[in-house]
Image: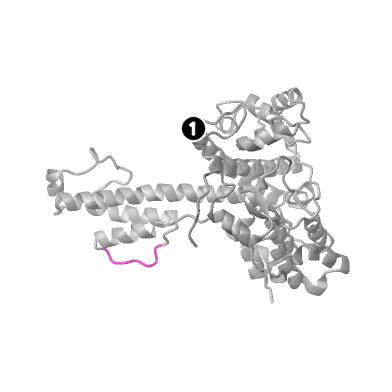
Amino acid sequence: MITLKELHRTLQQRKRPEDVAEMILELLGERLSFEEKRILEKAAKGSLKNTFLGYTSMMQEFATAVGAEKQVKKTIEIFKLTPNESIDYNNIDAIKEFIAAVSPIIFKEVGANNFLSDRLNKLQRKEKGLDLSKRNYNKKWRLLKRLEKKLTKLHREIKKIEFQKIGKHGLSHKIEFSEFQKDYNSACFIAYYNTRCNLRSVFTNTSQERAFDEISEMLLNRCKANSANWWAIAHIYSGQKVITKLSDEQKGKLLGKWTGTLQEIAEFLAEIWNKNDFNRETMVVQRGNDSTTWNNTAGAWNKARDNWMNIIYALGMEYILDEICFGKVLRLMAGDVVAWHYSSGGQLDPNTEVWNKIPLPWEVFQGKEKCTKKLVEWHCKRANINPTKSGWIAPRVQRVAKFKPTPELVHGVTISNPYLATVLKKHKYFSGKKYRLVQW
């Protein structure tokens, strides 16, 4: 029997909508009307449990950052410390505390990592009573330096994964079980819609599949007709009809969360932008560009911005946009996709023109540039874009998509068979790299 605990676990995973629909079907059972069950079964019949193969080539989890277990254990070994199994090797604060506790043993200052100027010489070691040979001291000093470097890398990787999740499903992965379990209808909507938001992009020259489909609509309607935990729902779906159900205090808290999130993302976007040589005029990816990190973080910015915009309007505070109106952040496009657009009679996304003309969002956030609603409207008009309908100055209009079975994808290309997809992935087909033969 499926439990709410299992359903809540899917918020941290990347399950297929079909598999979560099957879980919801079992969980709600007779509480569903005939019509609701019919709609839900459109997806549930395609679950791994109900298919002959019972297999998917698609990863069911988000990537995880590799912790500092190797480095911490080696430090304990070299420094001859008492092993401490309570250390969380994936926790930034725990690793910081460990480094802060070990560094004074050799009188190393945390963050002082210049090999020429920050090490103690023989006389300084003697003065401090450090009875270590130069070789032994250098070995321990370098080890702590590598541990600090690993901490920096781990922090960045955790941030990248966090922003990837936000770009997909907002803040749903932050919903605690104590909040999730308060209402069955809300829990089912959140879990299913979360899987739809997590769908991977398809290699196409048309728009991507919308996350909000007919099953999401049915589950949300159950919330409207019965009980609902609107606070939890607002963490993943911030449509006006949901936000208006919140108290002013809850709206304020959510606005604070999304504003803080925007600030964090803006800082990271600026870092990526400065480290890469992006072609802002076309946003076509070039060799050497870190397109994956940029696109994931751009997605996080746009998702956070949409939620921020929804709350601003729900609070009747849209006048703020007259002073500060953050723009969207465009993703990098693969050259072959752009060529496909042109060959099929299309052209460069007109949003690119607006992106080119208005100040960069992080510069606005840092107070270096000013971007107002009036400025965005003017550039949208020049690009022949409706600024309201396109989401530049107002919340996006939510449309309901028909449910479509989740495809097996290899770098965005649909493959008919999951086993074939696995083989193609191993050989690096459709990756943009030279394919290779893998020994089985």
Q: Left or right: where does residue 96 sit relative to residue 428?
A: left
Q: Is residue 408 highlighted in magenta?
A: no
Q: Nearer the viewer, residue 105 or 140?
A: 140
- Residue 393: which quarter of the image? top right
Asked if one can make out residue 108 in the rendered structure from this viewpoint, the answer is yes
Quadrant of the image containing the N terminus: bottom right
Expressed as whole percent of the image width and height from the top left, the position of residue 295 reads 59, 41
Residue at 78%, 31% in the rendered image: 386
Q: Which residue is mark 1?
A: 274
Q: Nearer the viewer, residue 338 or 232?
A: 338
Outermost residue to the bottom: 1
The span shown in magenta is 81-87
The amino acid sitting under disc 1 is Asn
Label 1 SS = helix
Residue at 56%, 43% in the rendered image: 432
Residue at 59%, 47% in the rendered image: 430
Q: Left or right: where does residue 362 sit relative to residue 169?
A: left
Expressed as whole percent of the image width and height from the top left, the position of residue 233 reads 71, 56
Q: Main secondary structure of the magenta part?
A: loop
Expressed as whole percent of the image width and height from the top left, the position of residue 360 reads 59, 30
Residue at 67%, 30% in the rendered image: 352
| 283 to 159, vertically: above or below | above
Q: Is residue 82 highlighted in magenta?
A: yes
| 420 to 288, vertically: above or below | below
- Residue 380: which quarter of the image? top right
- Residue 326: which quarter of the image? top right
Asked if one can make out residue 178 in the rendered structure from this viewpoint, the answer is no
| 77 to 309, vertically: above or below | below
Q: Nearer the viewer, residue 139 or 111?
A: 139
Expressed as whole percent of the image width and height from the top left, the position of residue 354 reads 68, 27
